[in-house]
Image (cartoon, grey):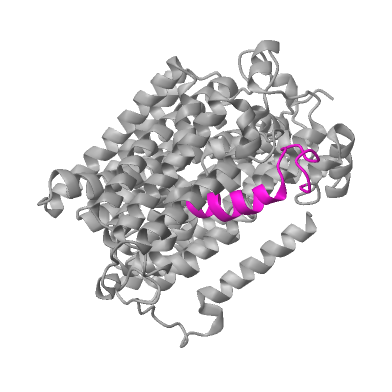
Amino acid sequence: MKPGSSISIWFFIGISLLVNGALIFAAGMYELMHPPEYPVVLYRLHASIWWGAILLCAGIVYCYRFRPTRAARANAGLPG
Amino acid sequence: MKTALILVDAGRLVHLSAVDLVIIVFYFALVLAIGWYLKERANTSEDFFLAGREMTAWIAGLSFLSANLGSLELMGWAAAAYQYGILATHWYWIGAIPAMLFLGIVMMPFYYISKTHSVPGYLKLRFGESSRALAAVSFAAMTVLMSGINMYSMALVMKVILGWDIHFSIWVSSLTVAIYVALGGLRSAIFNEVLQFILIWAGAVLVPILGLIEAGGWTNLKERVAQNVGPAYMHVWGNLGSFNSNPMGIHWTGIVFGLGAVISFGYWTTDFLVVQRVLSAHNLRAAKMAPIIGAAFKMFVPFIVILPGLLGLALLPVKLTGEGAAVASGGHSYNEVLPLMLARYCGPGLLGLGITALIAGFMSGMAGNVSAFATVWTYDIYGALINKSANDQQYVRMGRWCTILGVLISIGTAYLVMQFLSIMDYVQALFSFFIAPLFGTVLLGMLWKRATPAGGFWGLLAGTLSSVSMWAWVKLDPSALRYVALSSNARDMAENMYRALWSWIVCVIVTVVVSLVTRPKPEAELVGLVYGATDIPSEGELPIYQRPIFWAGVVAIVFVILNIIFW
């Protein structure tokens, strides 16, 4: 992207991964504490928990790495 | 153990929980926010139609791929994998990778150096106004019609899967696309396509992972599929020696020459829907790298599309059928295999993300259609034929209105299809008529200096008419299939492959013959447009790992290895 004036696309992606990861992780934890009457196949693997955690971590990394304040400082020639 | 398949009832395939709905609503809010944020950066025509030509290779490459990854693509090819087995992978490998690499290495320099705004724009520079008008009008019309058909199909799927009202699905999703593309132009479409690409993977990748765990690994999966439907379903090339030995009824010549050499090159190198994304790159090297990056990811899309279809063959306790039989029996059709697999493994939250992936796929495809339509209409029809003295602000204004108009025409088409379902087949066939001949015209235009404006126009017209004629011939006399597709056992897909091949050959022959008897353009007018008359910047000073040709070679080697592994 042209330097100087925009929030990086990767920051928006970070937001999306962070929010979705948090919601999926929370839903997985809730299911763990309150097992569903009709579980999905391979419920015992608790995919919601580990996949939600992976998305959440990726979201945090992307949000931090591409945060708008860092981009603004870089554009102003300041250290990040 | 009771499983999620119990969730399947007559009214809908899956039930969404509150957290699933929150994930879907958050997705809509985010794409609109991106459009709103980018509206200040779409003030000039270069900004609005080509995203200021400032995208990196990664963003242009992921957007290039995402615009093609519509939800119908995801569900349709998962269904094809259930129906035809691993043969469906050809549409992702030989049906895409060579063409994408060819676009990046051979054709992109001419598109980029000529500074054209569109593929019809290139035809204007190379062959003149008549070729541009023919290509622009056909592309604009077919793009919005196809967009409407996809919209209707998507709404129908949402009705089947979620029980959503068909009008609600059509209006909410299409108006969201209209708003964010009209506000931010191509930049907004590209930003959202990259986001949608990530969401598609995040939402869909668990199905093959969990499916392989349930099946007990790849070897066990192959054995189960062989037991259920036969070993021919698990070979990419091994059963293409005759028309009768594979589930698709196709010969390897149809796959290699029809799909691999004509249809895929036609689509990936001349369909402006995808080429527009690459034109937004910030320099020539990025423009060459973007399709190569797209190709690298494209090779692995079968993991989230084809593999779920194969897993469905091996693991689903119900037998899926064609749409007609499913409606008659109250069962499930091939097209539902991906949602069924999602419902099988994904609990609350994950299911919402999976459904979001399908919606994101639909919206990225539609945004691609309307932004390409707006560009071709504004530059190649409005600016070329209606208002030749339009200024930059008029172009931007027209682009915004066209975006909304394109969406409204698509919605109208969706409702038309709802009333007259057979229209869908006709429009899909119409779209296929233009792709193969257009590739012949553009290819000769770029690589043969002797090709003349008259040759380009008459070749394109003859190729298109020949395709229409062959299609009509088989419609009127089904026994003609043995001539068009070389076998009376050929299925629809095989017929499409051969029809494309013949129409491309007709286009090339007519272009060559007419060119040889008409006056060529002076070489000075071909600079920047044709191989041999254009100085393509050297990359010799770059380290080898930064050169597009090096990465194209890497992708090509992986492509060959994958074909050998799954032979």
* Above or below, comparing residue B435 to residue B229 in the picture: below
* Above or below, comparing residue B556 to residue B326 in the picture: below
Residue, x 32% and y 43% (percent of image)?
B373
Q: Nearer the viewer, residue B264 or B406?
A: B264
* Residue B45 in sight: yes
- Find residue B74 and report its horizontal and vertical position in percent: 59, 39
- Find residue B474 and report its horizontal and vertical position in percent: 56, 30
Residue B512 falls left or right of residue B15: left
Seen from this angle, which residue lies furthest left? B389
Residue A9 falls left or right of residue B395: right
- Find residue B92 and report its horizontal and vertical position in percent: 62, 50
Residue B194 falls left or right of residue B235: left
Which quadrant of the view contains residue B404? top left
Residue, x 31% and y 45% (percent of image)?
B134
* Above or below, comparing residue B403 to residue B55 in the picture: above
Seen from this angle, which residue lies furthest bottom? B541
Residue, x 35% and y 66% (percent of image)?
B112
Q: Nearer the viewer, residue B9 or B457?
A: B457
Verify whether residue B248 appears in magenta. Answer: yes
Q: Which quadrant is home to the N terminus of chain B?
A: top right
- Marks counted in the figure total 0
- Find residue B136 and report its horizontal and vertical position in percent: 31, 46
Verify whether residue B74 appears in magenta. Answer: no
Which quadrant of the view contains residue B344? top right
Residue B175 falls left or right of residue B333: left
Q: Which of A23 and B552 is in front in this view?
A: B552
* Residue A68 in sight: no
Start and end of the magenta stretch? B240-266
Residue, x 78% and y 29% (percent of image)?
B316
Q: Which quadrant is home to the C terminus of chain B?
A: bottom right
